[in-house]
Image (tube, rainbow, N blue to C red):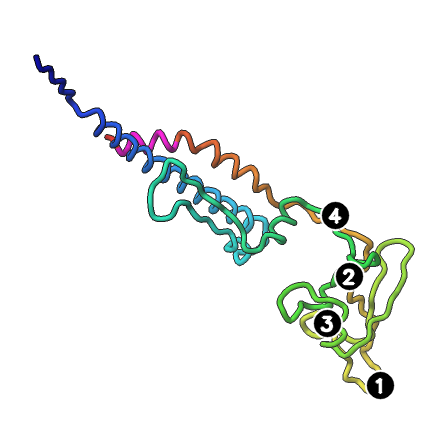
Amino acid sequence: MKLQLDITPDLVAMMAAEIKAGEKAVSKAVNEAGNSVKSAWRAQISGAGLGQRLANTIRSEQFPKGRPSLSAAAVVWSKAPVIIGAHDTGPLIKSSNGFWLAIPTPAAGKSSRGGRITPDEWERRSGLRLRFVYRRTGPSLLVAEGRLNARGRAVASRSRTGRGVTTVPIFLLVPQVKLRKRLDLARDAERAHDSVPGLIVANWLEDRF
């Protein structure tokens, strides 16, 4: 006697199809979550007034590349992690040499590199010497003898008689400064993380029906 069992539909083929659908659903959900975090972080950074250039340092990437997987993962990061991290945590900043932090006033202008100018660079560029002024109340100062140009920047006076020369505060000197926390990146990451199960189910059903 010969017995033959035929199973219709083919369970092996059905399981293989379900696994394939699951891989697609997981990969798509993870990709959506990663892009959601990237967009939210960029919006936070630009909304905090930190500029679109810094916002664009946020990048995302999915693994494995080029194929769906049940173990798919997304990584979101910044190409300027120190700056982003500082605005995310609001750290207490102290001088590296234990003395003063020099905070430039509007009269100091910007660094040639586009960031915060230092006292050494300011003296080299302006040709003026900075003078220390101690104050018992409020921050002490680094000042220079010069004039303010039309843009409000301190420059050397061209007057031979000294007319128009004034003492201009160039830097405020403080022992430390608390950077204000302007970002909450963990909030957006947690929201995206919590959304992944629902996205997987939605994408799985969408692929089937």
> Between disc 3 and disc 1, whose residue precedes?
3
Determine the secondary structure under disc 1.
Answer: loop
Asked which secondary structure carries label 2, the reply is strand
- The extreme top residue here reads 1
- Image spot of residue 130 (x, y percent): 82, 71
| Whether residue 202 is situated above or below residue 3 in the rendered picture | below
Q: Which residues are the magenta region?
A: 199-207
Q: Can you identify the residue that label 4 sits on?
A: 92
Dot 2 or dot 4: first in sequence order is 4
Residue type at mark 4?
A: Leu
- C-alpha gap between disc 4 and disc 1: 46 Å
Quadrant of the snapshot with the N terminus: top left
Q: Position of residue 75 (x, y in %)?
A: 48, 45
The residue singled out by tag 2 in the image is 102
What whole-number distance in Å separates the C-alpha atoms at marks 3 and 1?
A: 27 Å
Mark 1: amino acid = Thr
Q: Which of the labelled discs sits on residue 121, or is there none?
A: 3
Q: Main secondary structure of the magenta part?
A: helix
Identify residue type, mark 2.
Ala
> Which quarter of the figure is the C terminus placed in?
top left
| Magenta region includes residue 1 | no
Q: Is residue 201 magenta?
A: yes
Mark nearer the viewer, 3 or 1: 3
Give the image location of residue 160, x and y in percent: 82, 87
* Nearer to us: label 2 or label 1: 2
- In whole angstroms, how far apart are the C-alphas of marks 2 and 3? 12 Å
Q: In whole angstroms, how far apart are the C-alphas of marks 3 and 4?
A: 25 Å
